[in-house]
Image: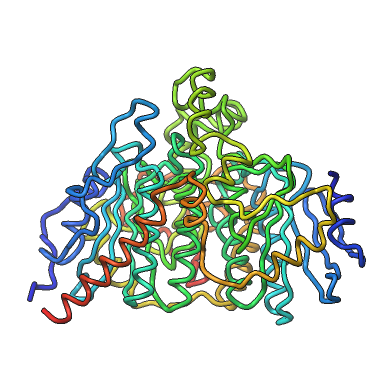
């Protein structure tokens, strides 16, 4: 599905979305007549300081407008831009700033939905898609932390060995199924059906806590994370009570 | 009651282990670990790669006191898997941040990490995202989440993104902060873009002095546990919260950085633009002289 096809299927009532380089930003109308903000990174491009600051600025403007309308973040990116200039200027702060602006928007009453419709990797994935309250994907999306050839170099394992291991566990290898099983993606949409009602269904979900670790446990791809985090909370509370009464 | 005092023996933060750092950092005898190594909560994934596990999965989390005040502390062990975030490692920090919100206690994260643990990359990546969310939720509840950076592994990859969500960052000269590591840039973009063996280049591009000068860190300290401790005590007295005003101020701060330094080809050019007299001398300056030279630095001013 091309970006234009995707937008047409998402917003049959019309949208006004502009593309600037690898970034898109604009507004559209939901089936119920309400507005939705749309922004994102497209064309499989890397996310560097220049793109992150523009996207974050847009999110902060939306929060300041006070309209509390949902924000849809479309993602088809590479990884973070790997360059001396970006790191010299403090890329980590720019990527974090973008993630924080999306988390802020959610906390200030905007529903935030990520739609992964292409690739994304590493820091770019964390700063965009993974900073939304609900991440959905289209079939064919291909998230990754690192591609297998690079992983083979770093782990010093032959790529055939890595591929064989990837059959046994969803925990390390790239791909949509693996990210689904580990709980990072809420649902993969059906692209042969209209997308607008599928978006409406996501927007009807109750707003709440981070449920990705619980999903990962239910789907069998990440069995320990939720239990360990919960246990730390319980133990800390018990120790606190003990200290107060002791 | 324990005295509000750490063991006042000088300890190199860079050389120390995670447990040594905690012992020297919090009030003496005040630390109590949560899910300690005796419970053997190890990575369920490393065996697939025939790699050894560690009983604490490379991170120590627990409760302690800092100058008499109850705090929560996490310390990464850079000597195990480069301090990288795996499923269990990350979940311990996520849990600690959620506990902070419930108990309303400040959190100190002693970073020492290469980023996501590739052998459990998907779980590690999701842990980073869950931690960043938990940091912001804690900060919005008025809790400080401080990042301390000066370990062997630095603070790379997803670790650097978590650091970017912290309310204040304390660094030493050894505290490197960067998303892509030197080897990753060189492997992907070539040695002309970044020569990872040029150590001076690595330090001046990613090291603590540069980060402090551009406003990427709030406090610069000696490579000593007590210096980190004092800076953390001071940082807990600063402004709290993470609302739209804070992020708008950060937006302006980061835009200004691009305007001022966006064309610079090297850190030395940025230091020169800051008005530093002898910019090439910065790497050699001891702490006191460096702080004097840094008086015109870009300050984050709580815009973080």
Counting from the top left corner in percent of width and height, residue A23 is at 78, 53
Q: Which residue does the image show at 34% across and 69% down from the upper left? A: B99
Would residue B233 appear left or right of A164 to someone viewing this image?
left
Q: Quadrant of residue B93?
A: bottom left
Q: Can you give x and y, in whole percent of width and height, for residue A55 in the image? A: 70, 60
Q: Please tell me whether residue B191 is drawn above or below residue B126 in the rendered image.
A: above
List x then y, in percent, for residue A179.
Answer: 58, 44
Observer able to see residue A182: yes
Quadrant the C terminus of chain A occupies: bottom left
Q: How many marks?
A: 0
What residue is rendered at 42% in x and 48% in y?
A223
Q: Quadrant of the N terminus of chain A?
A: top right
- Residue in front for this viewpoint, A137 or B301: A137
Q: Position of residue A209 (x, y in %)?
A: 51, 68
Q: Quadrant of residue B217?
A: bottom left
Nearest the viewer among A192 and B225 is: A192
Q: Is residue B80 above or below residue A106?
A: above
- Asked which colour scheme the image uses, the reply is rainbow
- Res. B213 visible in picture: no
In the depicted structure, whether residue B1 falls above or below residue B97: below
Q: Is residue A95 toward the left or the right of residue B281 in the image?
A: right
Q: Nearer the viewer, residue B134 or A123?
A: B134
Left or right side of B61 for A178: right
């Amino acid at each position: 599905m091309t970006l234009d096809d995707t937008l047409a299927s998402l917003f049959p009532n019309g949208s006004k979305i502009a593309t600037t380089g690898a970034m898109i930003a604009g507004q559209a109308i939901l089936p119920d007549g309400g507005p939705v903000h749309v922004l994102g990174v497209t064309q499989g491009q890397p996310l560097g300081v220049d793109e992150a600051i523009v996207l974050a600025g847009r999110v902060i403007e939306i929060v300041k407008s006070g309209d509390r309308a949902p924000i849809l973040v479309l993602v088809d990116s590479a990884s973070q831009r790997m360059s001396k200039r970006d790191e010299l200027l403090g890329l980590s702060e720019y990527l974090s700033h973008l993630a924080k602006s999306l988390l802020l928007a959610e906390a200030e009453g905007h529903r935030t939905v990520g739609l992964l419709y292409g690739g994304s990797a590493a820091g770019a994935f964390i700063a965009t898609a993974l900073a939304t309250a609900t991440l959905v994907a289209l079939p064919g999306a291909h998230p990754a932390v690192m591609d297998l050839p690079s992983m083979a170099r770093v782990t010093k394992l032959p790529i055939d060995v890595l591929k064989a291991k990837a059959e046994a566990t969803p925990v390390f290898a790239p791909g949509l199924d693996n990210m689904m099983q580990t709980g990072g993606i809420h649902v993969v949409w059906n692209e042969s059906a209209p997308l607008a009602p599928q978006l409406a269904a996501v927007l009807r979900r109750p707003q709440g806590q981070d449920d990705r670790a619980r999903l990962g446990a239910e789907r069998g791809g990440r069995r320990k994370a939720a239990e360990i985090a919960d246990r730390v909370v319980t133990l800390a509370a018990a120790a606190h009570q003990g200290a107060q009464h002791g | 009651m324990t005295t509000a005092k750490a063991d006042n023996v000088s300890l190199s933060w860079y050389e120390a282990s995670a447990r040594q750092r905690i012992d020297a950092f919090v009030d003496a005898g005040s630390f109590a670990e949560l899910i300690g190594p005796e419970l053997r909560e190890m990575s369920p994934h490393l065996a697939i790669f025939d790699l050894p596990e560690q009983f604490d999965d490379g991170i120590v989390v627990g409760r302690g006191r800092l100058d008499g005040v109850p705090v929560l502390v996490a310390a990464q062990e850079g000597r195990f898997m480069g301090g990288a975030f795996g499923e269990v490692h990350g979940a311990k920090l996520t849990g600690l941040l959620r506990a902070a919100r419930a108990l309303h206690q400040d959190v100190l994260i002693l970073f020492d990490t290469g980023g996501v643990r590739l052998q459990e990359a998907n779980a590690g990546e999701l842990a980073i995202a869950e931690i960043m969310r938990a940091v912001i939720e804690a900060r919005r509840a008025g809790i400080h989440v401080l990042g301390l950076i000066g370990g062997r592994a630095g603070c790379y990859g997803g670790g650097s993104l978590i650091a970017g969500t912290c309310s204040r960052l304390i660094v030493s000269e050894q505290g490197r902060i960067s998303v892509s590591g030197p080897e990753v840039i060189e492997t992907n973009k070539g040695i002309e873009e970044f020569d990872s063996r040029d150590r001076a280049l690595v330090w001046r591009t990613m090291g603590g002095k540069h980060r402090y000068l551009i406003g990427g860190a709030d406090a610069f300290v000696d490579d000593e546990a007590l210096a980190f401790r004092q800076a953390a005590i001071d940082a807990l007295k600063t402004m709290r919260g993470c609302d739209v005003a804070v992020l708008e101020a950060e937006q302006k701060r980061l835009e200004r950085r691009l305007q001022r330094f966006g064309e610079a080809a090297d850190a030395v050019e940025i230091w020169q633009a800051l008005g530093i007299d002898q910019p090439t001398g910065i790497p050699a300056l001891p702490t006191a002289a460096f702080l004097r030279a840094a008086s015109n630095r870009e300050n984050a001013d709580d815009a973080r």
